[in-house]
Each structure stands twice: as C-alpha cells, then as structure tokens.
Amino acid sequence: MKNIILKETPKLRKAIEYIKNTNFNDMPDGKIDIEDGIWANLQTYYTKEDALFEAHRKYIDIQFILTGQEKISVCKYETCKTNIPYDENKDIEFLTSESWDDIEMHTGDFLILYPSNAHKPSININGQHHVRKLVVKVPVD
C-alpha cells in the first residue's frame, strides 16, 4: 500500500517511529499515552456492513492494521454533509457523502488520515473479519 505523508512534522515522525518500534502482540486493548500529546487506541473488533463517515479537526489519524482486514472508505471533508454535528470534546463529526474511494487494508497496512479526509473505517471485505488495529492520534499543531 502506498502512503503519502502530506506534511511531515516532528510529532508525526514520533508517531511513526513508535509504531515501527513497538510490539503490540501482548498489549491489552485500550488507550496508550505516547508523548507530546500523541496517543493511541489499541482495539479488537469485528468489521461491520456500513457506518457513517467521520472526521476530526484536532488530530491526524494513523490507522494501522495489526491483524485482519477491513475496508476504509475515504472522501474529501468538503464534499460531505453533516449527520451528527461536531463534538469538540470527542473531536469527531459524523457525516454522509455520495462519493468516496474504498481502500482495502490488510495486516501490516497503515493509512494516514488528515482533517481534510472524512473516513469510514471498519467495513467488511467479502464478509465480516476479526481485526486488531492501532489508531494513533497525532495533534495537528
């Protein structure tokens, strides 16, 4: 999978180095504080049929598939319509869109999503799959 880093920042570089240098196999699911406001959520779940798009304003997401596979649909934020208004405390807005690209994610793949990207993660690829994923949240500032 080809990943594009639009603007490499010291915090984004720290997050990528953390992913590269950490063994997540024996870690329990949950929140992980990294440093400099960077944190991650380690999660295990089953993919689903569909979901709303989501977007964030304060954080860049790095979605890293540890095991399993899922589809992440991605579109430009500006092409979306609000479904559930932005919640500043949770840094999330839920949206709908009529146009997007689907990206198949498999074990070892990662995707960097900026605030300009609305995304719909955790979607089935040819049926439901068991996934273990790390989502790293990198402050935009």
Image (cartoon, helix red, strand yellow):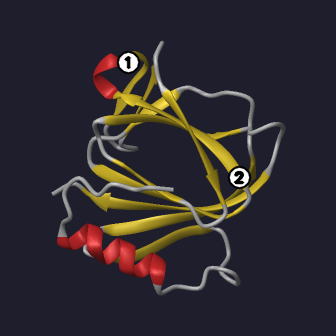
Residue 45 placement, left or right of 119: right
Label 2's element? strand
Which residue is drawn at the image coordinates 28% and 58% (left, top)? 5
The x, y position of residue 8, in whole percent, is 20, 64
Structural distance between the alpha carbons of marks 2 and 1:
26 Å
Q: Amino acid at mark 1?
A: Cys
Q: Residues within 10 Å of mark 1 (few under 14, many from 20)?
A: some
Q: Is residue 17 left or right of residue 54?
A: left
In front: mark 2 or mark 1?
Answer: 2
Give the structural element (helix, strand or loop) at label 1.
loop
**Farthest residue toward the front?**
2
Q: Residues within 10 Å of mark 2 (few under 14, many from 20)?
A: many
Which callout, 2 or 1, points at the residue further toward the start of the chain?
Answer: 2
What residue appears at the point 46 percent right and 17 percent down from the top-left corner?
99
Q: Position of residue 19 (x, y in %)?
A: 46, 76
Foreground pick, 30 / 109: 109
Dot 2 amino acid type:
Gln
Q: Is 116 left or right of 100, judged from the image as shown?
A: left
Q: On the rendered structure, is 17 left or right of 21? A: left
Q: Is residue 11 above or below residue 97?
A: below
Residue in the image at 37% along x and 80% along y: 17
Q: What percent of the width, then of the height, locates residue 67?
A: 71, 65
User: On the rendered image, what quadrant is the C terminus found in?
Assistant: bottom left
Residue name at image x 31 percent, y 38 percent: 88
Measured from the top left, where is residue 32 in percent x and y? 49, 73
Seen in the picture, residue 50 relative to 5 is either above or below; the reply is: above
Task: Name the residue tied to disc 2.
Answer: 69
- Residue 7: which quarter of the image? bottom left
State the residue position of label 1: 80
